[in-house]
């Protein structure tokens, strides 16, 4: 229980021990000058998962490593990489877990992405059955 | 002594629950009149004893009785009184005790006040309620005893998690629990009705106030939770599709569908199977939510950390209760006569569409929440499913639902035609189109979903009031006003959500005292950093001023707090609220050069999100009052007439 | 309403139950493994962490001999626990290079003076740049790298005495 709590607290409220004394990475908390790039970076950061936290995006986490990841994201986007490229770079290293946006092109996630359509069709089919019944009644 | 008394009271309550169940089950089997008569007082007694037990636990926390293990693990004598009180349910055991207390109280209330139900159905309902309580009593007494003692008695407790030391804790969990567990009444009613085959308008009318009551609490609880997370956690987000958040949303979705469905059953005697299934699903979602949060199988910022053993216990309970109720449904519903027919374009049709859409959204949230677990179990691969998926999957459906919500109240019962509807809804459509046009023209960077959402919200807001058109306002029933305000509340919340996601502006600055920061029309001045002290914390406070355009200058003080007992640091945001949005300022860490990390957000119309939630709950409250009053008046009229004859 | 449709909710619940029961049986871990195992070490060049040891670059890991790369920090408590095992490995002839994560020269020097210094070279990674490039999610972690600079194995967490034989075996196989 305590270990769990301390993990949670680390990312949202920082424990005083077990923390590096170094300042954050250059672009961890500094916005990019170009608003378009900053917006793209921000959108990406909200979809990337903090490696050390229970479940937070790197945009929302106070953990030092999240700050380092934010810095990487901003630096790469400033250097001209597209958000998708940065995301792929991270997925190459940590797997799909690091992205809150599950992949579309993987067989494992087809059921997930097709679920809305399938369920909607199922719902329509259910409703049709019901109304057809009542229509026959007339 | 007090702890032991509390434990004894809990055992007594559990025994009474067992008796209640036995009286009901045997009474129905053997048709024993005396058992029927006895079950009501037993239910009331059970409610009283379990409440006593809970009150005693609160007392232990208020007195900081450090000989009780739960108090030691979750409280400290230096804590402010409010958090000692609220800390009672800020942990697994205490919140489980709250759960059974609300169940017991609900049962007692049914026993005391339910008059319009057929007697056998009432008995079956009380027996079902007791049967469910038994499982949770067993869970508490066997593996989660809140009154356990600890030896040797430590000098001080470990304190409450600093993030929970906030008025929100006093409000959010109890409200949610009244909602979750209130749905157990609907579940028990449904089971009782299925057992006695008494599914009709009378049953629906009896169940409706309970559904409304629980739903109102859930709405308020979720709204409060969202606002609490927003200002407490410091990053300005109000919903993250976190598994625990989803666990609270799923019962709400089912309950919303249920409360609409039960009205159709009460007034038109239709949608019987839907109503029964939704009543079962709603509380099932409550129980599944409780299981997910406490079992440790899902990773979440909010989760209680409980070991998988306890999770297995709850899972077993789920299998018995949910499996049992669904099997009962499959066996009995085939024999339940369907109500009167209706056409596709009709009020009933819209309500069926409402049910279906809510069910699909519920299913998607469910699937998305469990998918990572499923994938890991089957392939070993680790996956994350978060806001990008949920927003994309449920957003469009939610907008479709909002459109149905706008049209529904304007449709006639049983049979209507599409052209007539279009006529009645023409003004809202025009408003939505105009809003869409204006937004597309004058704003940039809005996502498609937000753009459509905002435009639709405008139309829906107007459509919500359409039922009042050409109506005598003073003779319009209260519950109709309830519906109007609730639907309007949804539109308001939608405006807030779309606005916040599209128009928020952020500024991250490393600032020295004396620096100025500007965001949108705000100019902020960072004046000083000073240390301050609170009851169980010390903090560094930033003295800042903020001015909107040429308006008044306000003082704001974001803080970085340090809690020595828990050895943790939290950030207390400073909020400044205007009619058109909120300024949100957070103080971060300082560097070696005397500069401080300051984060400033301007969030236009963000407060509408929670204002909308409150309006929705208010609408529900009016609907409940209106129905209860009407039911009371009708009963009085009936009694009068019968007395005359 | 179709007969079998009425049983659908129960069936769906059964599926949920099965999925969750399996989930309960799998112990939950929050370990994120690197996906770079089996791939070449990404190129990097880090400055020296302390005066007494040279700097570390990816070229140093391609010298034809399998090596261990240990990522540690002075503020990391489990790193203290694995220090004896690292010293033992070094004495067995294994070349161990290190990356100090988010650390200052003074703290690193103090740490190594106190707990022993088994490292050949130590690079300092103050912004987790190399850690991210390699797919490491925390400290301590140890990578087995073959003579061509390809990552063969990732060991997450401190090296316990029982882990030492496995690491030696992997190093041999990587020859």
Image (tube, helix red, strand yellow):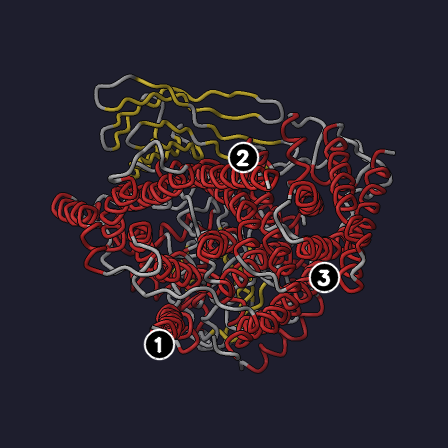
Q: Nearer the viewer, mark 3 or mark 1?
A: 1
Residue pointed to by mark 2: B168
In the picture shown, does residue B559 fall above or below A88? above
Nearer to me, B636 or C102: B636
Q: Indicate the secondary structure of the residue bearing disc 2.
A: helix
Task: Residue B25 in the image: state x and y as whole percent.
Answer: 77, 61
Kindly identify which chain the residue marked by label 1 belongs to.
Answer: A
Chain of the residue displaying label 2: B
Residue displayed at 70% across by 52% down: B126
Report which residue position mark 3 lands on.
Answer: B313
Please name the residue shown 39% across and 36% down the image.
B611
* Name of the residue lying farthest toward the left: B441
Image vertical order of residue B201 relative to residue B42, above or below: below
Residue hosting label 1? A136
Give a yes or no on whether discs 3 and 1 share a subunit: no
In the picture, residue C172 is in which quadrant? Answer: bottom right
Q: Position of residue B253 (x, y in %)?
A: 46, 54
Q: Are marks 2 and 1 in contact (CB under 8 Å)?
A: no
Determine whether, in the image, residue C30 is placed left or right of residue B400. Answer: right
Task: Tell me the residue at 34%/38% (across/down).
Answer: B606
Mark-to-mark CA distance, 2 and 1:
55 Å
User: Quick check: B415 above or below B597?
Assistant: below
**From this viewpoint, is residue B496 visible?**
yes
**Position of B231 compared to B214: left or right?**
left
Q: Tag 2: Cα neighbours inside 10 Å, few (<14), some, or many (≥20)?
A: some
Whichever of labels 2 and 3 marks the residue nearer the N terminus, that label is: 2
């Amino acid at each position: 229980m305590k270990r769990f709590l301390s993990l949670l607290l680390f990312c949202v409220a920082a424990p005083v021990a077990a923390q590096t004394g170094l300042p954050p990475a250059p672009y961890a908390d500094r916005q990019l000058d170009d608003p378009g790039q900053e917006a793209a970076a921000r959108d990406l950061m909200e979809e990337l998962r903090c490696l050390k936290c229970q479940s937070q995006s790197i945009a929302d986490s106070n953990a030092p490593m999240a700050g380092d990841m934010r810095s990487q994201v901003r630096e790469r986007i400033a250097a001209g990489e597209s958000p998708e490229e940065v995301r792929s770079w991270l997925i190459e290293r940590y797997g799909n877990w690091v992205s809150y946006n599950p992949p579309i092109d993987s067989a494992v996630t087809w059921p997930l992405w097709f679920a809305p359509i399938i369920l909607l069709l199922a719902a329509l089919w259910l409703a049709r059955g019901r109304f057809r019944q009542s229509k026959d009644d007339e | 002594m007090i702890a032991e008394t509390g434990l004894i009271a809990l055992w007594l309550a559990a025994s009474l629950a067992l008796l209640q169940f036995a009286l009901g089950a045997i009474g129905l089997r053997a048709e024993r009149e005396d058992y029927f008569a006895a079950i009501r007082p037993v239910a009331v007694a059970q409610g009283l004893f379990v409440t006593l037990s809970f009150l005693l636990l609160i007392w232990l926390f208020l007195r900081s009785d450090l000989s009780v293990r739960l108090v030691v693990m979750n409280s400290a004598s230096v804590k402010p009184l409010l958090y000692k009180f609220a800390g009672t349910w800020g942990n697994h055991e205490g919140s489980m005790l709250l759960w059974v207390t609300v169940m017991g109280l609900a049962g007692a209330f049914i026993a005391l006040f339910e008059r319009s139900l057929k007697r056998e159905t009432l008995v079956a309902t009380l027996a079902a309620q007791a049967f469910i309580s038994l499982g949770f009593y067993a869970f508490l007494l066997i593996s989660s005893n809140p009154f356990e003692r600890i030896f040797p008695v430590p000098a001080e407790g470990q304190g409450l998690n600093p993030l929970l030391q906030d008025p929100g804790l006093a409000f959010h969990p109890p409200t949610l629990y009244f909602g979750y567990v209130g749905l157990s009444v609907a579940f028990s009613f449904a089971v009782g009705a299925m057992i006695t085959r008494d599914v009709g308008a009378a049953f629906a009318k009896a169940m409706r106030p309970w559904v409304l009551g629980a739903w109102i609490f859930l709405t308020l609880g979720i709204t409060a939770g969202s606002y609490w997370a927003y200002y407490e956690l410091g990053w300005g987000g109000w919903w993250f599709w976190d598994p625990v958040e989803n666990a609270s949303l799923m019962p709400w979705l089912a309950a919303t569908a249920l409360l609409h469905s039960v009205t159709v059953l009460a007034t038109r005697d239709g949608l019987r199977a839907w109503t029964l299934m939704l009543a079962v699903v709603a509380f099932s979602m409550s129980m599944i939510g409780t299981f997910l949060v406490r079992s440790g199988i899902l990773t979440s910022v909010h989760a209680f950390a409980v070991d998988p053993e306890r999770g297995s216990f709850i899972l077993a309970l789920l299998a018995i209760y949910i499996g049992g109720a669904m099997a009962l449904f499959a066996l009995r519903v085939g024999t339940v006569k369907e109500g009167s027919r209706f056409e596709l374009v009709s009020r009933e049709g819209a309500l069926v569409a409402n049910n279906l859409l809510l069910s699909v959204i519920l299913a998607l949230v469910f699937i998305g929440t469990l998918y990572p677990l499923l994938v890991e179990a089957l392939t070993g691969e680790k996956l994350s499913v978060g806001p990008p998926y949920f927003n994309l999957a449920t957003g469009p459906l939610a907008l479709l639902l909002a459109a149905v919500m706008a049209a529904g109240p304007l449709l006639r019962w049983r049979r209507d035609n599409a052209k007539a509807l279009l006529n009645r809804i023409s003004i809202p459509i025009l408003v939505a189109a105009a809003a869409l046009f204006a937004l597309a023209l004058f704003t940039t960077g809005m996502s498609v979903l937000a753009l459509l959402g905002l435009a639709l919200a405008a139309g829906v807001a107007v459509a919500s009031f359409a039922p009042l058109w050409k109506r005598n306002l003073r003779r319009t029933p209260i519950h109709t006003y309830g519906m109007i305000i609730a639907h309007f509340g949804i539109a308001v919340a939608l405006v807030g959500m779309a606005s916040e996601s599209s128009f928020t502006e952020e500024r991250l600055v490393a600032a020295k005292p004396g620096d100025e920061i500007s965001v949108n029309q705000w100019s902020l001045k960072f004046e000083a950093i000073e240390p301050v002290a609170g009851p169980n914390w010390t903090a560094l406070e930033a003295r800042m001023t903020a001015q909107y355009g040429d308006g008044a200058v306000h003082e704001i003080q974001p803080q970085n707090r340090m809690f020595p007992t828990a050895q943790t640091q939290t950030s207390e945001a400073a909020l400044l609220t205007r009619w058109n949005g909120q300024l949100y300022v957070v103080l971060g860490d300082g560097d070696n050069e005397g500069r401080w990390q300051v984060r400033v957000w301007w969030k236009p119309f963000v407060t509408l999100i929670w204002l909308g939630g409150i309006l929705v709950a208010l609408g529900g409250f009016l609907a409940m009052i209106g129905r209860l009053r009407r039911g009371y008046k009708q009963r009085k009229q009936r009694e009068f007439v019968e007395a005359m004859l | 309403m179709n007969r079998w449709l009425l049983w659908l909710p129960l069936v769906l619940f059964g599926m949920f139950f099965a999925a969750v029961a399996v989930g309960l049986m799998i112990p939950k871990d929050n370990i994120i493994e690197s996906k770079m195992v089996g791939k070449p070490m990404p190129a990097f060049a880090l400055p020296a962490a302390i005066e007494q040891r040279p700097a570390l670059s990816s070229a140093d890991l391609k010298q034809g001999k399998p090596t261990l790369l240990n990522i540690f920090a002075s503020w990391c408590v489990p790193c203290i626990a694995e220090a004896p095992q690292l010293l033992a490995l070094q004495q067995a002839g294994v070349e161990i290079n290190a990356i100090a994560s988010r650390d200052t020269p003074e703290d690193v020097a103090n740490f190594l003076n106190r707990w022993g210094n088994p490292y050949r070279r130590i690079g300092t990674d103050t912004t987790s740049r190399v850690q991210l490039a390699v797919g490491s999610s925390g400290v301590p972690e140890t990578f087995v790298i073959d003579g061509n600079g390809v990552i063969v194995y990732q060991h997450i967490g401190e090296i316990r005495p029982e882990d030492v034989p496995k690491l030696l075996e992997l190093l041999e196989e990587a020859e």
